[in-house]
Amino acid sequence: MIQKIFSYLIPIKIFKKKSARSKIIEVTWANGELVLDSENTNYSYGSLQRILRYGLRNIGYQNILEMDHILLLGVAGGSVIKTLVDEIEYKGKITGVEIDPDMIQIANQYFNLNKIKQLEIIIDDAFEFVLKTKENYNLIIIDVFEDIKMPNFLFEKFFSERVCSLLKNQGFILFNTMILDEAHNVRNRKYISEINPKLFNSKMLPRIEVHNELIIIEKVA
């Protein structure tokens, strides 16, 4: 409790680990909250939770409450899962795919992710999982980062078409991206241009928390 109080004055690091997949992982008390960070960016809670909450609000909490199954690619500490369960009070199934088992261990230990009964965690590569799954989803949240880098496969037409094919009717994709230079702007515009406008509505929510841009895709046909 003392650490929590003092964290309003200065961040207090309580855990640090080197992970083979994620390099440095840190858990810190900041402004009275536990946050999960990599070496150069926030991985869960803190700014990331605010960013994805904004995206979910744009989709509509009432729409989300009516969904049966949500897929999360990139779990980290699970802040968006906490938003879904604790704030929106979503009751349906959540499947979380995370490549780094160390991340899930930390999420369970510090953020009690393993106490969420409707959550299934799968340790797998997001690309491989998307190719294998036979499920369809009402909402697919893509939040895959390696520190501040995003794997190239996320923006390949083959992958985006495969993810879109997993949506149920009136389903949504919420894709969190990072914009650090003009090349990233071009990358995102190209990504949007390749989405079939006859089947999907798509839009960008730019410059959230300075460097993040959300892409929202809705299946309409």
Image (tube, rainbow, N blue to C red):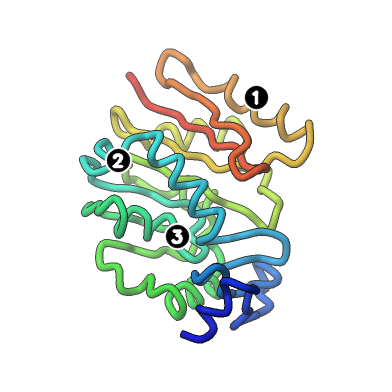
Which of marks 1 and 2 precedes in the sequence? 2
Q: Amino acid at mark 2?
A: Tyr
Q: Amino acid at mark 3?
A: Ser
x and y percentages locating residue 25 in the rendered image: 64, 72
Q: Is residue 160 above or below residue 101?
A: above
Which of marks 3 and 2 precedes in the sequence? 2
Separation of marks 2 and 1 at Cα, in angstroms: 27 Å
Q: Are marks 3 and 1 in contact (CB under 8 Å)?
A: no
Mark linked to residue 8:
none
Residue designated by label 3? 79
Closer to us: 196 or 86? 86
Instruction: Say left or right for 76 vs 59.
Output: right
Q: Amino acid at mark 1?
A: Arg
x and y percentages locating residue 22 in the rendered image: 66, 67
Q: Secondary structure at mark 1?
A: helix
Instruction: Say left or right for 90 vs 123.
Output: left
Mark linked to residue 189:
1
Q: Is residue 61 above or below residue 17?
A: above
* Mark 2 neighbour density, 10 Å: few (under 14) some (14–19) many (20 or more): some
x and y percentages locating residue 136 in the rendered image: 32, 41
Q: Nearer the viewer, mark 3 or mark 1?
A: 3
Residue designated by label 2? 61
